[in-house]
Amino acid sequence: MLTYYELRPSAVLAPYVRAYRVLVGTAPAGQSIVVPYFPDGGLEITLNYGSALGRGRNFDSATQVDSAFAACSGVMLHTQMVGLSGALDVLNIQLHVNGGVALFGSGAGSLRDAHTPLNALWPPDVLRRMEDWGKLPPLERIAPLECLLSTRLAAHTPDPLMRQVFKVFHAAHGQGRITSLLDRLPISDRTLGRLFQQQVGISPKRYLRVMRFHETLKRLRSGSASWADTALAMGYYDQAHMDHELVALAGLSARKLLMVETFGAFVQTSGGFLQDTPPESA
């Protein structure tokens, strides 16, 4: 049986960390479960204390073996598939985009759409500490993890301008034009583009597109409105336009997306689903 926990970060780390995901147990014998990670505008750090994971972009398989103990996935433009098999013991740290900037510096944009071993980004002593946590029960790793993240974040000086930029962008949920958002910011279009390429790795327009995809998928899953009403509420011309955008970013239409298995479809869930909290500082 597989057990999945999704845990909130402490109040101090909440502006940078969206959630911690813990997956432990054994996958069904002889099976490899393939689950999607959809683009959400954030970054992820994965610590794997169990069997090697599979990765890929095909909804039917994840054939590339990921043998790294610790790795960071940058802001994604495409859905990434993760294959789960054997004995599983995974700790996943979901970061707001500004959390990536705070932990990996202004060059965080270079991590875009890539899965980078953490030993290429952080010093060996940090990796050794993380490996030692494997001796602890899965949920007891959160406390030392938060201490480590707090220490590394203490050296980060928030950028007031980017704090304001992310606040405006997240409040828009991916809707609106860049020109209208710029009216609320003391920054030029050229400077905004340069900062996004450095710190996020994509243009402001593409980031808005990813954010709209993420918010649209959340609303479709909630079932609180019809698909046609959701399409209009999210600024699409119609349902066909919404489907076209979902296919472009996820490879599937709305109907098929809602049929795809996610973690909650095959594991025992503890703690419930967390709503996203917009980052408050950069």
Image (cartoon, rainbow, N blue to C red):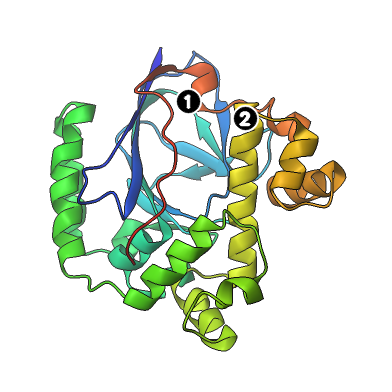
| Tag of residue 4 | none
On screen, 282 above or below 279?
A: below
Task: Identify residue for label 1.
Answer: 85
Name the image quarter holding residue 1: top left
Q: Are marks 2 and 1 in contact (CB under 8 Å)?
A: no
User: Which residue does the image show at 76% across and 51% down from the upper left?
Assistant: 245
Is label 1 in a helix, a strand or a loop? Answer: loop
User: Which residue does the image show at 76% across and 34% down from the upper left?
Assistant: 227
- Percent position (x, y) of residue 180? 63, 72
- In this view, the residue in front, 164 or 1, is 164
- Percent position (x, y) of residue 235? 73, 53
Image-based side of 34 in relation to 103, left or right: right
- Percent position (x, y) of residue 237? 83, 52
Task: Identify residue for label 2.
Answer: 221
Residue type at numbered disc 2: Arg
Image-based side of 196 in relation to 156, left or right: right
Quadrant, the C terminus = bottom left
Which tag, 2 or 1, sits closer to the chain's start?
Answer: 1
- How packed mark 1 is, by other alpha carbons closer than 10 Å (few <14, some 14-19, many 20 or more), is many
Image-based side of 112 in relation to 131, left or right: right
User: Which residue does the image show at 72% across and 39% down from the upper left?
Assistant: 230
Residue 11 is at least partly visible in this image: yes
Name the image quarter holding residue 19: top left
Image-based side of 47 in relation to 209, left or right: left
On screen, 270 above or below 205?
A: above
Give the distance between the C-alpha atoms of the residues marked 2 and 1, in whole angstroms. 27 Å
User: Which residue does the image show at 66% across and 28% down from the upper left?
Assistant: 260
- In this view, the residue in front, 243 or 165, is 165
